[in-house]
Image (spheres, helix red, strand yellow):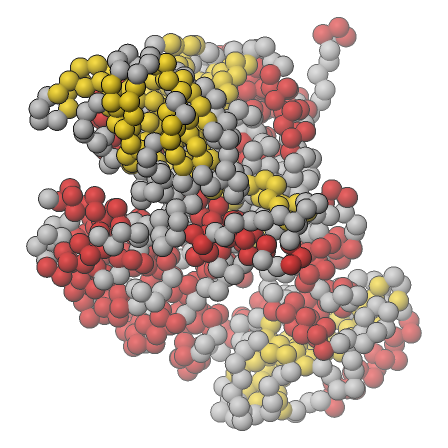
Amino acid sequence: MKIIVVTILICGFGLLSTQKLVRNYSIDEQNKTLSKKPEFFAMEWQEGVVLKNKPTPFFIEVETMGNQNIDILVTQQNRPVLYTADICTPVCADGECRLMYITLYWNLLGAYAGYDKVEGQTLTKHDHVEFLEQDYEKLHHLLMDDNSILKRKKIDELVLKPKESELDGVDAIAGATIAEVKESVVDGALYSCYVAWNIAHGPIKAELQEYTTSMFDNKLKGYMLMSSEVDYQMYALNSLSESEYLDYKDRIVQIFKLGIPLVRTYIVQNLPKLFWESESLQRPFWESFAEVDINNRSLLLNHIQEAPLEVLVLLASNLEIMTKNQLKLYLSAIENIAMTNPDINAQLLRFAESGNHIYAYIVAEFLEEME
Amino acid sequence: MKYLVLILCFFGINFMISQDLLLEAESFDEKGGWVVDPQFIEQMGSSYLLAHGMGVPVENAQTQVNFKKNGEYKVWVRTKNWVPGEWEAPGKFQIKVNGLVLENTLGLRSGWGWEYAGAVQITNKKNILELVDLTGFNGRCDAIYFTTSDVEPPSSMKKLATWRKTVVMEPLAPKITKKYDLVVVGGGIAGCAAAIAAAEQGLQVALIHDRPVLGGNASSEIRVHTLGIYGNFERILKKLDTEHYPNGSPEAHNDQIKRDNNVKSYENISLFLNWRAYDAKAVENKISYVDARQTASAERIRFEAPLFVDSTGDGWIGFWAGAEFSYGRESVDQYGEEWKEHGELWSPKQPDNAVMGSSVLWRSYEAEEVAEFPEVPWAMPVARDYAKVKGEWQWEFSRNDLNQIDDAEEIRDHMLRAIYGSFGNAKKLPEHAHRKLEWVSYLVGKRESRRLVGDYIFTLNDAKSGRTFPDGVVEETREVDVHYQTVLEDEKNPDFISEALFYKTPKYYIPYRSLYSKNISNLFMAGRNFSTSHVGLGGPRVMRTTGQMGAAVGFAASLCKKYDVNPRDIYTGYLDEYMDLIENQKYTPIPESKK
């Protein structure tokens, strides 16, 4: 598989000797291990772990610099953890080129995971000033943004001076103003940032994900599901069969409670029907009602007709956190038992009389109509 | 001013004869600093007056009220506290009758309903009534009801509608009927383009719009700049579009003047500004008429025509007429719109009712003197610690329990809280001591709502592949850009800030078949309510593109008239002539003198 990163300007002839040097450098670095957390890293790192480099069939071809191999980093038990590559690439601006050295890491789904400086090689800006610590940090932040403005703009669009009238704002199309670009890139190092971002987020991403898919087994599935990485959770959830949903039900509930809204949504939207047919299987999700975000409360409430009585009672103690439409949905579900179930009735009365709550009037009107 | 005096209304068990008068606030003779807000009529029942003073109490609204009989009247006001909570209500106001303030402060109750203002002794026929804003923070008054009875008017929407009908005794049908070749409802860029295209082909056109100015999201009231290409319709669209200023810029006023003047220059466009359609009647899947009401005076007109254009954005005409429509996100498999990289954010495995949100734009400026801004505790649960001095397109709100149509008032109010709260936070920083709010829109700028279903549903795949159509009348090069709320990825983010995902495409085309209803035979649609999937809407929802849609249906309408046929027949029987007409729009027409 051949991935070409096209650098901005053709590098000068003077780079040739360096090119040879870099290739030697790659060979010397074979069989290495990674025993400490990369200096700039977006994932959790397990202290004490030693990861071993193993070759993959992938490489990034950098124009004038040849192939830059991608390794997979595995544990002693041979479980894949990361992908990595020592990158040496020319960065050229205004006819002048210099080399940028950086060790990049990707997670198992090809997403940028972090980077290390290469020993003895600092990153520099256009004026040859070396990166400061905060510049390295900013580069890391930029690389973590998979939806960066750099993604949809050519380099000449980023440096193009906009019309005077555009200086004050951005929009979703022309989108980029100089101000927005400046915010996300290292000052004075736009070209380095652009090159690094496009290597990290280039076609290699999909290739690596595909490679992981080819070796995706139950062990890896379990690992991803147990991981705190959002995209691992999502990837693993997406691969679960109905019976695996049952096998992993406790972990799924845990992710639902503690995960980000997007993952919770995936869970509640894709739970197999049998969960909603079983009181015990659905109960833990309802018990998370107060802890999850508004969107996911709504998605849970879409299943209120399948909920057992004890859930309806539980929800009655959560009226304060319901939105207007959630309250309406809840009230329509309990219409027939609102006056007969003492627990629910008491909660409704308490809420209706709570005075200043924004939606207390809805319950008050409901009770009025019930009488 | 419109008010109704009712004698011999029976209320209460004693059947007391009472003297009653219902006054719609929006019909006040002088509105002072209050503005007419007709955005939520379908949900809360009426236009209302809004004290949109950005924190500075607005000037009193005032009107003359004539009573037939003297006596003591109880005064009820339909209003609501738009942010009830453990704080002072933000939108408080009072009623003044003949210079005397009534005893109760208003704007305190949760949910729309009647609040008792106090009793007033009426001793003269002519009386002056005033609304006195106390806060400048969006107090709202829908109606004022004077009654000699002791009965409180009903608040629940169901009972209120019946009560209003009884009180107002309005006949079912408007008294005035007007007939046109084409009725266009909605004066956004799409509606204006439709009206112009049809008018240029000689049709008598009615253009109904519920605001005082044309342009919808591009108007000086909302201030989104127009994007996209002109396609075949550069000449027409240049009469309507905007410069590429930052969203929210006052430069929108210049384009507003251009746009309004251009539309008004067509003698055969009858322009109904400040008129809002409230019903459409279809018989055997053909619309016979659209009824509309003046947003302040409540005067009504029935519009009859053989052809209608729904460019309301929310697809109201189609909705009332029974047109098929969709709302929300299709499952990723329904049209195969996957973008692996962005997964569920782009297109979900299961369909849902999430949509792109509405924006409320705003800006502030550096004043010469130090400027105070009041504490806004009622805004803080939304704004939290977010601190900003202006809001661009990213200020957008959508949540899956809120429908962009049915819950638009709550969406707008949420954005107002976000704005005032964030500005309040910014004002606490020394560098913003001189900052003053310059402009905050009170209109919701919607991106997505109902999408009416046509003979063809435009999807991402049409854009991705650059698919050509024999009836491709709209063309675009703009990326497909779908928004999501950033709070979905991190709960620490404000829930009113969005992010855009851009899918680059080649030039793509929208077929004419996406611009007329599948099941309502004489209904065109143009604008964001055209026939598309959720993701498909991501690209062509911008206003030069929707303008192209408008122009395309305007020209189609002219052929419908020429051959006395319906929109679908243009595709099946007159496509060559139609496409020639569209193609010819690329060229400047030869002046009559040189023919």
Residue ID at (77%, 75%): A131
**Height in image: B134 above or below A193?**
above
**Quick check: can you spot residue B475?**
no
**Quick check: can you spot residue B30?**
yes
Which percent across, then down, holds residue A243? Answer: 28, 72
Picture quarter with the N terminus of chain A:
bottom right
Picture quarter with the C terminus of chain A:
top left
In the picture, measured across the screen, residue B216 lies left or right of residue A171, that is left
Say how many tags the image has. 0
Residue projecting furthest to the top: B593
Give A29 or A290, whichever is nearer the viewer: A290
Residue ID at (16%, 43%): A368
Quadrant in the rendering for residue B299? top left
Which percent across, then down, holds residue B239? Answer: 66, 24
**Height in image: B14 above or below B78?**
above
Residue ID at (21%, 31%): B152
Residue ID at (38%, 9%): B176
Give B61 or A159, whichever is nearer the viewer: B61
Give B239 or B111, whichever is nearer the viewer: B111
Which percent across, then down, holds residue A207? Answer: 59, 69
In the picture, measured across the screen, residue A152 lies left or right of residue A283, that is right
Which percent across, then down, holds residue B428? Answer: 58, 58
Residue projecting furthest to the right: A14
Give A101 or B36, whichever is nearer the viewer: B36
